[in-house]
Amino acid sequence: MIDPSTLGDHVVHYSIPAIDQHGTGQIEETESIQSAKFQLRGGEVLISKLNPRKSRVVHVARHDFPVVSSTEFVALQVNPGIDPKFLAYMLQAESTRQTLDAQVQSVTRSHQRVAPEDVTHLNLELPPLDEQRRIADFLDAETARIDQLVELRASQLESTGARMLNQLSRTADDLRGRHGTVKVRHVLQKIEQGWSPQCEDRLTTEGEWGVVKAGCVNGGTFDENQHKALPASTPPELRYRLRAGDLLMSRASGSVDLIGSIGVLPEGLPSNLLLCDKIYRLCMDRTRMSPDFVALMLRTHRVREEIKLGISGADGMANNLPTATVTNLPLPDVPLSMQGRVVDELQAQHGVTQAAQQLLKSQLAVLAERRQALITAAVTGQFDVTTAGRSTPSGGSA
C-alpha cells in the first residue's frame, strides 16, 4: 500500500463511490485522500470485497496520472492467456456473484465482505483467447446501448422530479407571500429521534418487530420495506413505535442529499415498526399544522438550502442535521382550514408526474435485469455472439 500524497498533487482514484456513480476512477487531489491505497499500473481488473452481490467490477484504464484504488478492492493482474475485459465481464456474471455472496463474512448485510482468496480461488471456465475477445467486444457494444438507455431514463426521471419540485416551491413561495411565514418551532409540540439497537439485516416476519432505516422516507413518501428485524432477544422500546400520520425527517445519512428527506406515514401501516436514531419524528400542533401540509412545504428549494447550510455548519457532526436547523425551518402560515385544500390540489397535480416516475423506475429495473442477463448468457456460452441479434433492449427505445 502507499500514501497517495507521495505520488504528486493528483491521482486517479478507483473508490467504491466513484465506481457506483461513474463506473470508473476519478481524478482527485491527493490531499483529500485520507488513507493508504493500492497503487496500480493500469490494465488490472478490480473487484470489490464489500457486498459482492452488488458486483462492483471494473477494468482499470491506463492514465497520465498515477492510479490508486481503495483497499476494499482485490486487484487482479491478468495472465497473457486471459483478456482483461472478458475477465471483468465474467466476474459480473450471476453465477460468480452468487458464488461470492455465499462466502461473505459479517453479521450485517450492509457490510459483508469476501476474503481476497475467495476471489483468487474462483474456478472460472474460460474459452479460448480469441473467443474471449469476441465476447468482450460484443458485450462492450451491447452494454453500451443499454447504458445509453439507462442514462436517458435516469435523466427523464430526474427531470420529472425537478419539475414537480419547482411547482411545489412556487406554490410555497406564493403562500408565504399571501399569508406570511412561521417557524417550525412555533407549531411543534415535540421533536424526537429513535434508537439504534443491533438489528438483523432482513425484513421482519409475523410477530417480529422491526426498526426503520434512514432511507424509509424519501421524496415525500414512506417505504415500509426499508427496515431491519429486531432480534427476539431485544425487547422493543415501545415509545418509538410508529403510527399512521407520524411525520418523519431523515436526520443522518451517508448521502447528504438524503438528509432532510421527509414523509408522512400512511394508513394501513404495519404496527410492528420502530423509529431509528437517524430519523426525527416531528409531532406537530395539529390545531395549527397538518402533517401532510408540513411534509410538502418542507420539500421546497428554500428549505433544502437551509438544510444544507445547517449540515455544513454542524460542528464536528458531518452528514448530520441539527435539531435547531429543523425547528427554525420556515413554513407558510396558512390557516388550518386551507391546508387540506392545498394538499389535495398539489397531490392531484403531482399524480401524473408520480405515475410517470414509477414507469421510468420500472423501465430502469428492467434494463438492469437485461444487462445482467446478457452478460451472464454471453460469458457462459448460452448463445453464439457471432450470430446474436442486435435487437433493442427491453425498457423502451431511445
Image (cartoon, rainbow, N blue to C red):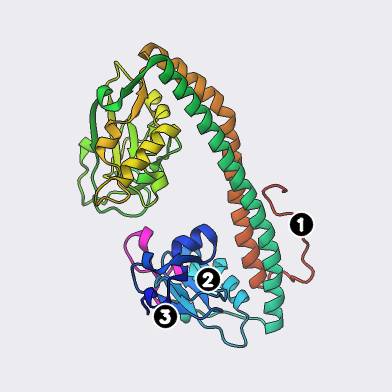
Residue farthest front in this picture? 9
Image coords of residue 3 (percent x, y): 36, 76
Q: Amino acid at mark 3?
A: Glu
The secondary element bearing badge 2 is classed as: helix
Q: Amino acid at mark 1?
A: Ser
Query: Could you tell me what secondary structure mostly forms the magenta stretch?
Result: loop
| Residue denoted by label 1 | 391
Q: Amino acid at mark 2?
A: Thr
Q: Which mark is residue 96?
A: 2
The structure residue drawn at horizontal position 57% and vertical position 76%, both measured from the top left corner, is 62
Could you classify mark 2 by the number of other residues whose Cα lies within 10 Å: few (under 14), some (14-19), or many (20 or more)?
some
- Distance between the Cα atoms at labels 2 and 3? 14 Å
| Residue denoted by label 3 | 117
Residue 107 lies in the magenta-colored region: yes
Q: 361 or 34, which lies in front?
A: 34
> Of marks 1 and 3, which one's residue comes earlier in the chain?
3
Contact (Cβ within 8 Å) of mark 2 with mark 1: no
Image coords of residue 299 (percent x, y): 42, 33
Q: Quadrant of residue 328?
A: top left
Residue range corresponding to the magenta coloring: 100-116
Q: 361 or 63, which lies in front?
A: 63
Image coords of residue 127 (percent x, y): 66, 81
The secondary element bearing badge 1 is classed as: loop
Label count reads 3
Contact (Cβ within 8 Å) of mark 1 with mark 3: no
